[in-house]
Amino acid sequence: MKIVWAFLLVLLMAFPCHAALKTIGKSDKLTFDPTNFPPQMKSDWQIMKVKCVKCHTMERTVVSITTGVAPISGQPFDRGATRAYGVKMMRKPDSNMNKQEVKACVDLMNWMLEESAKQ
Ligand code: HEC
């Protein structure tokens, strides 16, 4: 019986009931792992992974989401700030992004912030 409980405990620890945000790679190769993203977030990711690495790597966004602090300015990076950062990036010269694409990235960042908080 004890073995069964021990086994259950190991299972519980190995599989948390919520899917936490996962990242892969290091430094300039650091990026999000979309494997467990729900379908809508997977399609937003298709946009983000192209649009948000034009001028800098995904590392900047991963650090912002996982630490809650924007790495260049040191400003808070939370749900209240994602839209402003998205719009700021869109307005940069040659950003090659439209409003729908920014919205997809902002929705995805908001969802990722929630997931990240569950860890
Ligand atoms: C046209 C170039 C360009 C594109 C495209 C771009 N960025 Fe940036 N990004 C910058 C520059 C330049 C900075 C550094 C200075 C600043 O924040 O204005 C920056 C900084 C950042 C920061 C750190 C901000 C801070 O205050 O520390 C984050 C987070 C970020 N970008 C996320 C994104 C996301 C998410 C996207 C896609 C929606 C994106 N970027 C697309 C140019 C770009």
Image (spheres, helix red, strand yellow):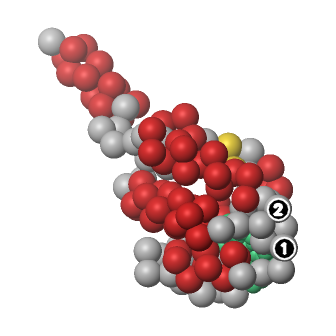
Amino acid type of the residue tagged 1 in the rendering: Asp
Q: Which residue is drawn at 40% across and 31% down?
A: 14
Residue at the disc numbered 1? 94
Which quarter of the picture shows residue 77? bottom right
The residue carrying mark 1 has its beta carbon less than 8 Å from ligand 1: yes
Q: Give how far across and how far down residue 49 sits, in percent.
A: 69, 51
Q: Give how far across and how far down residue 72 sits, in percent.
A: 74, 82
Vertical relation: 25 (above or below) 36: below
Amino acid type of the residue tagged 2 in the rendering: Lys
Q: Which residue is drawn at 55% across and 34% down?
A: 35
Q: Quadrant of ligand 1?
A: bottom right
Cα distance, mark 1 to mark 2? 9 Å
Report whether residue 27 is seen: yes
Vertical relation: 10 (above or below) 93: above
- Which one is in front, 118 or 81? 81
Q: Residue at x 29, y 19 (%)?
A: 7
Vertical relation: 116 (above or below) 7: below
Q: Which mark is residue 107?
A: none
Residue at the disc numbered 2? 54
Relative side of 108 to 10, left or right? right
Q: Give how far across and how far down residue 105 sits, in percent.
A: 57, 62
Relative side of 27 to 113, left or right? right
Looking at this rendering, what residue extends furthest in the left direction?
Answer: 1
Which quarter of the picture shows residue 91? bottom right
- Which one is in front, 21 or 39? 39
